[in-house]
Image (spheres, rainbow, N blue to C red):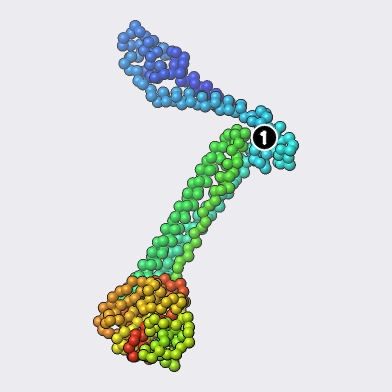
Amino acid sequence: MAVEAALAGLRAEINCPICLDDLRDPVTIECGHNFCRSFIQQSSPDLQDWFLCPVCRHPCQETHLRSNTQLGRMIDIAKLLQVTRSKKKRQEGSRLCKKHSQVLTLFCEEDQEVLCPLCTEPPNHQGHQVRPVKEAASHHRQRLSSYIEKQMADVQKLISIQSKQLLELREKVQKQKQKLASEFEHLTQSVEREQEKVLSRLAEEEKGIQQKLIANTTAFSDHISNLKALKKEVAERRKMSDVKFLMGIRSVLHSCGSLLPPAVYWVQLRREECSLPPQYSALQKIIQKFREEVTLDPETAHPNLLVSEDRKSVTSVRKEQRVHWNPKRFLVDPVVLGSEGFACGRHYWEVQVGDKPEWAVGVCKDSLTKERKQFPPRRKGKCWMIQLRNGDYVAQGSVPVALVLKEKPRGIGIYLDYELGQVSFYSLNDMSHIHSFMDTFSEVLKPYFYVGCDSKPLTIRAVRDYEG
């Protein structure tokens, strides 16, 4: 009733005092009253410059007629409100059951349908909870409001947990930085360069996780926005009539049930380790810690290779040895593998190459023994080694890299960091770094030895025998 009275008052205010109809092309005269332009111009035909206001009789100049466009827009809005209100009343009056043409006064909770009394006659909706529309609408309004409020509270808790993850990430990164810094404290310039690479990877990982955390926080913000929009929709629907409110209750409840918050993204920082390249002097303790007593596996040796009894030395011979068949044995090139397999951790061993004209040492995947054995291995990502062949030093990995060495190495130190994905090679002449491979390892790695066809031996040295 208050709305009807307000609309009636508004209609009275937008009438022209002359024609008593809605103002058309409204103008405002000097005294402040509003009229239709055409009627105020026609009201005093005998006066050329002056006329009296038909309402308050104030003398006004005809040239001081000011168009009131804002009032014109308000009149259009008032007309639209009047039309909308009339249409709504017609619609309210037509809320009848389509099947029985009866007034919809009941609501079935199980089927969530608005019903008329005839709809509830058996067997339809038999055993269902049916209650008056007004009671059902009140129940569901309260239910929706409670649901939205609970969802808002739950999401706020999740956002609080998510926000803490950024702080935990910084703490974890800081701890790892401190650990890495302590490991790098006594290393040489080459190790410092390695530290920079590791910290760069850690920073990239931190940045990546931060982006994921920020993206997830944004997702929570979007979810909050969706909840607010749903809350607004519910608030608007609560103002509807009971029948209209319940007519769309199914879609609203479906929206509520399907609006799930994003999952909290938990920080899992990969453990970074610095590479500890074995250097003479400061790193001798580290070499001792990670040294491996590598031995040769005769079961993999080419028939023209002779493995010593202690399995520390191998020599190429002209006469093929009598060996039993083994699927792991290399048959194309003079290659033998180490007996030890590495699937984690750090490992270091040394190989004496002397003045052999041809050789290769490194690591390979254990699965290489199941393929056709050819040197160098045709399939990329199977072997990581350095070799001397035809007088040239080459790092053989995914992509061959030519090496320029100041001095011919008489021995090679090999350092494997499985978790870091690094294989490094060092000259035993002065413990200088030759080359490092960076990759990702996912299966067992074994020491790899290409002996060549000359008669000079390839020998695995005990680390404790090295004297510089």
Task: Give the camera-side residue of 239 and 212.
Answer: 212
Give the residue at x 41% y 63%: 206
Instruction: Name the quarter where the C terminus is drawn.
Output: bottom left
| Residue lying at the far top of the rendered structure | 46
Give the residue at x 35% y 14%: 60
Q: Position of residue 301 (x, y in %)?
A: 42, 85
Residue 158 vs 89, above or below: the answer is: below
Residue 70 vs 337, above or below: the answer is: above
| Residue lying at the far bottom of the rendered structure | 309
Q: Position of residue 462 (x, y in %)?
A: 40, 89
Give the residue at x 50% y 26%: 81
Task: Give the camera-side residue of 71 and 55.
Answer: 71
Q: Position of residue 15 (x, y in %)?
A: 46, 18
Q: Position of residue 285 (x, y in %)?
A: 39, 85
Residue 449 can be seen, yes or no: no
Locate residue 154 relative to residue 447 in the image: left or right.
Answer: right
Total label count? 1
10 Å neighbourhood of mark 1: few (<14), some, or many (≥20)? many
Residue with the mark numbered 1:
115
Picture quadrant of residue 335: bottom left
Instruction: Name the quarter where the N terminus is drawn.
Output: top right
Residue 392 can be seen, yes or no: yes
Locate residue 351 relative to residue 95 in the image: left or right.
Answer: left
Residue 343 vs 454, above or below: the answer is: above
Give the residue at x 48% y 61%: 165
Picture quadrant of residue 418: bottom left
Task: Give the camera-side residue of 243 and 406.
Answer: 406
**In terms of secondary structure, where does tag 1 sit?**
strand
Locate residue 167 relative to residue 114 in the image: left or right.
Answer: left
